[in-house]
Structures are given as C-alpha cells and as structure tokens.
C-alpha cells in the first residue's frame, strides 16, 4: 500500500469509529448538556467530523503547559512560528483562558486553538467562552 492509501484508510477508520460513537452517545450527551443549561455550546456530529478531518490532515498538535502565565504566550507563539496549525493550552497553565482568547483573536481561522485537561462541563464551557475553536474550525 502507498502512504496515501494508508492515510486514507486510517482517516476513514477514524471517521467511522468516531461517527458511530458520537451517534450512539448523542442522547446521553444531549441530556447532560441540557441539564447543564448549555445548549448554545453544543456542536453537531458534522462539527466533530470536520475537526477529525483537520487532525487527520495536519496530524500534529502542540500541547502546551507552562509553569507561569508569562511563559504561556511565548510557548504558544513559538509553536505557531514553528509551523503548528493545531495548538492547545492545558487548563493547568496559569491564565490560559485569557491567553487562549488573545491567540484566537490573532489567528482566527488560521490556527486551531483549544484547551486540554478539561475535567468537567464548567471547564468546557469556560474554554468555549474564552474562544476555544478546535470544535469550530
């Protein structure tokens, strides 16, 4: 098999597995989201498929965790300058949500910017409100 065929096969397998999982989990996801009162933050299966396709195309994500708030934007800028088109701050990084909002505004549509280490619905809502856009790319 050629590299292109392998890439297409792995992308298709990932897409099928994720679509199947999302469809089977959709009622539970809707129920928990409704209970949290955050219907305005829901995304469709198509949104998730679009993100998975972008990950399959780019195949690399910079995951950034810094000990200080001051180091956070420097690390993100270095990753972007180095060619990363998908980057995330971990929520364990001090002030990451304000830095995320700054980078989202600066690179909107050019770089997917998101948050990791999301442990609950409130974390996810805060990341979305700050401009996390991996699920909107």
Image (cartoon, grey):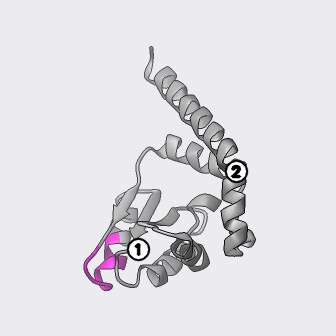
Q: Nearer the viewer, residue 48 or 1?
A: 48
Residue that appears at 60% across and 36% down: 15
Image quadrant of residue 59? top left
Q: Do we see residue 105 in this rendering? A: yes
Query: Disc 1 marks which residue?
Result: 91
Image quadrant of residue 13? top right
Residue that appears at 72% across and 59% down: 30
> Residue 67: image x %, image y %?
25, 79
Mark 1 or mark 2, earlier in chain: 2
Q: Is residue 73 magenta?
A: yes
> Residue 95: image x %, image y %?
40, 85
Q: Do we see residue 137 in this rendering? A: no
> Residue 134: image x %, image y %?
56, 60
Q: Nearer the viewer, residue 70 or 44?
A: 44
Q: Categorize mark 1 by other alpha carbons within 10 Å: few (<14), some (14-19), many (20+).
A: many
Labelled disc at residue 26: 2
Quarter of the image with the C terminus is bottom right
> Alpha-carbon distance for marks 1 and 2?
26 Å
Q: What range is drawn magenta here? A: 66-75
Q: Nearer the viewer, residue 33 or 105?
A: 33
Instruction: Say above or below: 62 vs 10.
Output: below
Tag in front: 1 or 2: 2
Instruction: Say above or below: 71 vs 1.
Output: below
Residue situated furthest top in the rendering:
1
Badge 2 marks a residue whose secondary structure is helix
> Residue 123: image x %, image y %?
51, 74
Instruction: Say above or below: 12 vs 104.
Output: above
Q: Categorize mark 2 by other alpha carbons within 10 Å: few (<14), some (14-19), many (20+).
A: some
Labelled disc at residue 110: none
Instruction: Say above or below: 82 vs 50.
Output: below
């Amino acid at each position: 098999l050629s590299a292109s065929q392998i890439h297409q096969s792995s992308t298709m397998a990932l897409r099928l597995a994720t679509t199947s999982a999302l469809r089977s989990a959709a009622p539970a996801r809707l129920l928990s989201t409704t209970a949290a009162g955050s219907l305005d933050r829901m995304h469709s299966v198509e949104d998730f498929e679009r993100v998975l396709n972008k990950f399959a195309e780019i195949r690399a994500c910079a995951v950034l965790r810094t000990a200080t708030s001051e180091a956070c934007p420097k690390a993100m800028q270095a990753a972007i300058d180095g060619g990363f088109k998908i980057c995330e701050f971990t929520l364990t990084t001090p002030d990451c949500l304000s830095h995320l909002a700054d980078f989202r505004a600066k690179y909107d549509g050019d770089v997917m910017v998101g948050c990791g280490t999301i442990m609950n619905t409130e974390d996810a809502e805060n990341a979305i409100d700050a401009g996390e856009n991996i699920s909107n790319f």
